[in-house]
Image: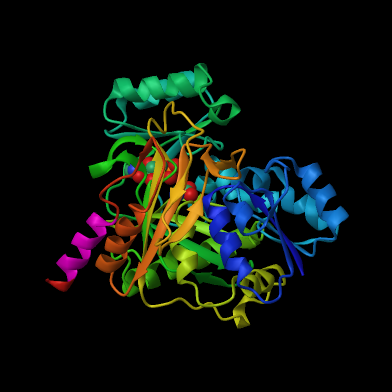
Amino acid sequence: MKVMVVGGGGREHAIVKALRRSPEIDELYVLPGNAGIGKDAVCVPVGAKDIPAQVAFAKEKGIDFAVVAPDDPLVLGAVDALEAEGIQCFGPRANAAIIEGSKIFSKNLMKKYGIPTASYEVFDDAQAAMEYVRTASLPTVVKADGLALGKGVILAQTHEEAEQAVRSMMEEGAFGASGSRIVVEEFLTGPEVSVLAFTDGHCVKPMVSSMDHKRALDGDQGLNTGGMGTIAPNPYYTKEIAQVCMDTIFLPTIRAMSAENRPFKGCLYFGLMLTPNGPKVIEYNCRFGDPETQVVLPLLKTDLFSIMKAVAEERLESQPVEFEDGYACCVIQASRGYPGHYDTGFPISVQDDFEGELFIAGAKSGNDGELLTSGGRVLGVVAKGRTLEEAIRKAYRENEKVGFANSFSRRDIGRRALAALEETHGL
Ligand code: AMP
Ligand code: GLY
């Protein structure tokens, strides 16, 4: 089989490495990939948003199966365009990817089908939004409707901050068209859990849960980033909570999407908050998470490609999806300054005795074929362990063996999860 993956970050590297283990795949292409992924698959210089070029490449190469990983091409209809040419795909069509593409869509869906989420109001008029936030209970949450690279969410502690958020989104166009409509919602509290789930529109099979670390600095300080590290499984997510989520969130969401004639096929990401009033949805993503995928897929025992095919062919019910019992930890190395300004072009070195898994997010090739940094998040070092403590210790040990001149990592990935685990076990 000839398979192509659309995307080019650490998540795609993890997907590529998992697909490479499949005996069914003879040729594996990544559009556009990056120089690090290029060691595991053939990179093709076609942008992740250039859908016509993706379709042209797939036809020219005789691609049998396409995996569309990032949100942008999914929301723009890459799966629709590839399927129109008879290419089987893993990923939702545009009419289902809207579950991430529009927060207003997903909030209205949850309200209509009784799926637990923060209460909210929608505004398309800046004046009305401004009046509302002036008296809203604090803290309050202001969200741009559309995709905003994970930056379209402001947690306002004061009414002035909330007004400023409305102003920058609706009047100053800080997020372009994404912010012309906004959602103002109730502030929720509790541990956050990411659950990625395979679904073919009929059945849903969740993967192991995980915990992201979104802030740039230790102790959850600093700016929001794409994610500075992850652990899996998430110790807050007990079997009992998983069952509640299945009954009140996962199945109702899949059924709601089908009832709306928007069957969701692919990986649906549930961003959950375990509030004192039960688990609630913070956000849906129409794709694998980054860097959640880097800890979840290394724990997957079943062949990823056979699951993806079962999803595409709507026979997930009879397809096993099994995970190892252990833990995994991913530590991201980012360029100093990220998520603000940073420099690139530094050589990435890996010691010979490196024993972890390395997922490259942002690298290009130098003149001598060496890897040079080319992004904010540059790479993720992943290690597995029988215990969470072991996975974290190994990930940090291996992290020391990889590096580049202006690298920085958080030092506390998994620390909160470990404390939670010790509490519940009374250690
Ligand atoms: P999102 O882009 O929707 O995932 O939001 C980014 C982050 O903002 C989430 O991971 C949460 O930590 C936080 N957040 C979003 N919505 C809320 C809410 N209603 N209450 C509290 N925190 C929130
Ligand atoms: N790690 C969060 C996301 O992928 O959206």
Reply above or below: 147 against 159.
Answer: below
Question: Within the image, what quadrant is residue 302 found in?
Answer: bottom right
**Secondary structure that dominates the magenta span:** helix
Question: Splitting the image into four quadrants, where does ligand 1 fall?
Answer: top left
Membership of 423 in magenta stretch: yes
The residue located at (56%, 56%) in the rendering is 13
Reply above or below: 316 against 268.
Answer: below
Membership of 171 in magenta stretch: no
**Location of residue 422 in the rendering, given as x and y in whole percent from the top left corner:** 17, 67
User: From where the camera sits, is residue 114 visible?
Assistant: no
Q: Depth check: give the residue in front, 18 or 269.
A: 18
Question: Within the image, what quadrant is residue 223 found in?
Answer: top left
Quarter the C terminus occupies: bottom left
User: From where the camera sits, is residue 245 visible?
Assistant: yes
Q: Depth check: give the residue in front, 151 or 113.
A: 151
The residue located at (32%, 23%) in the rendering is 161
**Location of residue 226 in the rendering, given as x and y in whole percent from the top left corner:** 44, 42
Reply above or below: 396 against 366.
Answer: below
- State how the image is colored: rainbow
**Location of residue 97 in the rendering, given as x and y in whole percent from the top left corner:** 63, 50
Q: Please state the extent of the stretch shown in magenta in the rendering.
A: 414-424
Q: What number of labels is visible? A: 0
Task: Spot the residue most to the left.
Answer: 427
317 to the left or right of 87: left
